Image (cartoon, rainbow, N blue to C red):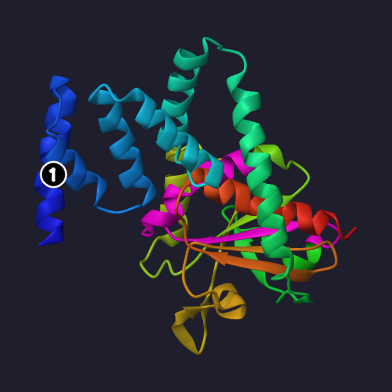
């Protein structure tokens, strides 16, 4: 029933958006009550703006930014409303960055208690050019492993944020491990995906275990609850963090930034 309701709500919402029409208060409340997932909040903020409730939209978006869970769409709309409200085009980036610094500072307090100090399982996998790469080759560097698959929608949704993180941390080695690719032509499929999307990722292909082809070498060694999964490894080869899932770009960027900063502080 909820899926059907969402379907008809989506039709109503986007019809209204395309026609620049206002929605009744009862429908606005229905949409608001659909949940607090970032995608739902983003749609609600858009509808508030559409219904000439820009102050409410701004307050909602600001709150999401302060919690560090805003999407790119929310951030774009927040920027638009900030400039309109403050008549200031140049100050937004510093304003938004300041909000996220506060989020990262609080995150570090939470994550510090969750840091581990176990040996990161070594692996030897091949990249898309068939060159072998092992974790021991990267000793002395902070390493971020990103377990993903071409069929995994949350994995792919997280990639714009991961691309931003790579730019922010050029000294960190990011390895994107394509795993659970059980169909033939896995390497070509992965290569096509990264090329078409112009992702500058260094991709390794996880290998099925010889005694159990349904299981994969690196994924089995690190044992995340699912994918996408991010593993942070320190320069001494110790596994410090493991995080799974994806909610929003800003949340992921803040989380990985906090983890990297905590690892750096150890050296």
Q: Position of residue 200 (x, y in %)?
A: 58, 40
Q: Residue furthest toward the bottom?
A: 211
Using the image as rendered, state which of residue 221 and residue 38 is in the foreground. 38
Number of numbered discs: 1
Q: Is residue 97 visible?
A: yes
Q: Position of residue 243 (x, y in %)?
A: 58, 65
Point out the stretch of residues depicted in magenta: 138-166
Say which residue appears at 12% left-offset and 33% top-offset.
24
Say which residue appears at 54% left-offset and 68% top-offset.
206
Say which residue appears at 67% left-offset and 63% top-offset.
110
Q: Position of residue 27 (x, y in %)?
A: 14, 41
Say which residue appears at 47% left-offset and 81% top-offset.
215
> Which residue was labeled with disc 1?
9
Q: Position of residue 3 (x, y in %)?
A: 15, 58
Using the image as rendered, state which of residue 22 and residue 237 is in the foreground. 22
Using the image as rendered, state which of residue 98 and residue 136 is in the foreground. 98
Residue 239, picture quadrant:
bottom right
């Amino acid at each position: 029933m909820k899926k059907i309701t969402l379907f008809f709500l989506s039709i109503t919402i986007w019809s209204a958006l395309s026609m620049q029409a206002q929605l009744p208060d009862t429908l606005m409340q229905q949409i608001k009550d659909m949940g607090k997932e970032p995608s739902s909040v983003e749609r609600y903020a858009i509808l508030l703006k559409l219904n000439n409730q820009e102050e409410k939209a701004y307050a909602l978006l600001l709150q999401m930014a302060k919690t560090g869970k805003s999407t790119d769409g929310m951030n774009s709309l927040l920027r638009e409303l900030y400039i309109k409200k403050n008549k200031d085009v140049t100050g937004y980036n510093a304003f938004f960055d300041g909000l996220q610094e506060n989020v990262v500072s609080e995150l570090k307090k939470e994550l510090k208690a969750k840091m581990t100090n176990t040996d990161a399982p070594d692996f030897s996998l091949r990249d898309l050019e068939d060159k072998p790469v092992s974790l021991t080759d990267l000793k002395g560097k902070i390493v971020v492993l990103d377990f993903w698959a071409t069929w995994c929608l949350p994995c792919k949704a997280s990639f714009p944020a991961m691309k931003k993180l790579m730019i922010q941390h050029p000294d960190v080695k990011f390895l994107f491990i394509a795993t659970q690719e059980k169909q033939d032509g896995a390497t070509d499929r992965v290569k096509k995906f990264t090329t078409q999307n112009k992702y500058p990722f260094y991709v390794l292909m996880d290998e099925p275990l010889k005694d159990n082809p349904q299981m994969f070498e690196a994924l089995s060694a690190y044992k995340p609850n699912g994918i996408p999964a991010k593993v942070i490894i320190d320069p001494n080869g110790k596994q410090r963090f493991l995080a799974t899932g994806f909610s929003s770009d800003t949340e992921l960027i803040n989380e990985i930034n906090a983890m990297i900063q905590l690892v750096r502080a150890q050296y």
